[in-house]
Image (tube, rainbow, N blue to C red):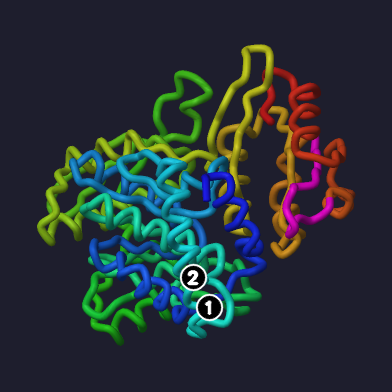
Amino acid sequence: MNFNESVSYLYGLGHEILAMKLGLETIRLLAESCGNPHLEFNAVHIAGTNGKGSTAAFTDSILRAAGIRSGLYTSPHLDSITERIMIGGKGISPDDFARLATLVREKGEGLVSDGALQFPPTFFEQITMIAYLFFAEQGIDLAVLEVGMGGRLDATNICRPVVTAITPVGMDHQQYLGDTLAKIAAEKAGIIKRGVPVIIAPQKEEALEVVLARARELEAPAILSGNNCQAVPVQISDIFDRGKYRITCQSGGLKIESKLNLRGRHQILNACTAIRISEELAGSGWPISPDAVSSGLSSVEWPGRLEMITLSDDKAPILLDGAHNIDGAGVLREFLDDHFHDTPVTLLFGAMADKDVDAMCGVLFPAARIIITTNVSNPRAESSEKLSTLAANSQAEKLRTESVTEAISLGLKITPPTGLL
């Protein structure tokens, strides 16, 4: 298969979420048929509801600043599927992706032909194996792996971690992970391994109790993060500095100071978790200095998370954020209240129907003067018509479009240059 054929094949396996199959039997069989590439490198394994991607990006940036050849595996992607599999900050090439996708497809279909599997491995299982194969053949030093969903039964959970981390646990994907915070936390805590240190970000008490109990059961040292850093907003010189913080952190007897390159107060906690991960790695012999930690935090890039872009001086700046659950919506609202409370905000909003859309709208819609609801090109998407009805009680002007392209064009047209889209 060439690159386009490989992408079409993978998407043809079914939607990443809708066709998902939690469980480790298939990924273990697939890994064995591929030579168990996941056993050829150590890993940092990160689960959680919110912040796991940012924490992974911080950690990978620190490792690269330390001169460690690191691989980063995250999901989903924004633009190209190759963004999910990165080494040294660069995505896998289309040719390498196609070559490994072809191999994984052949191995999966072989397992079906041999009767070992009833169905081919899923989209996420095959992407995960492509990442493991690429990391192994490229001889990385350490992989930073973001869990796709949950943790216990996620395809990434066959890795060999030297440290694990649990970012804040919240209510999301209840139809797959459980209908209480405790049940969801138990799934996240499923990545904890016997004797392997686990870094635990600040949690609600119900979730923290579950995670700590699992760590005790497996005699895994539990390190609480988030209580060792002080942060102050950076001096704002232009709009791009809004929401950025400078942190001072006492960790392992060392003082770390850095300006975070990601926006939002929540990134302080994600950075603290990444610092704790780095501290554990350094204590195990990985060559990570305080300067590398500081440099990594200040140079990290993570698109689509409170990302600010401008198209021209006569157009309003655009804030991009993938707030995908009630906690994520709360973080976005906090950011808008903190830094754009006196700015005319146009909110362009689309969402998946299997999310708690009513609650998310209740959090976000009051922050806007104009609300544009739109249809997202995705089989899970909620209709713009339904989203528009949720805005009925809002004091904002309400508009509706049939596509994201149309919504962006309209938003840029009606939002003043001094506003925010």
Circles 2, 1 touching at the beta carbon (< 8 Å): yes
Residue type at tag 1? Val
Viewer-side residue, 217 vs 57: 57
Where residue 247 appears, as percent x and y from the top left, is 32, 40
Where residue 236 appears, as percent x and y from the top left, is 45, 23
Q: Is residue 6 above or below residue 420?
A: below
Q: Disc 1 designates what residue? A: 112
Could you say whether the residue bearing mark 2 is in a helix, strand or loop? Answer: helix
Q: Quadrant of the C terminus?
A: top right
Where residue 388 appears, as percent x and y from the top left, is 86, 48
Q: Is residue 128 above or below residue 398?
A: below
Residue 186 seen from this side: no
Residue farthest top in this picture = 314
Q: Residue at x 40, y 46 (%)?
A: 96
| Res. 108 mark | 2
Q: Residue at x 53, y 48 (%)?
A: 77
* 196 horizontally vs 394: left or right: left
Where residue 212 appears, as percent x and y from the top left, is 35, 78
How many numbered badges does the structure rendering display?
2
Residue type at tag 2? Gly
Start-end of magenta stretch: 370-383
* Magenta-span inclusion, residue 376: yes
Q: Residue at x 57, y 40 (%)?
A: 79
Is disc 1 surrounded by few (<14), some (14 to 19) or many (20+) residues within 10 Å? some
Q: Is residue 86 above or below residue 420?
A: below
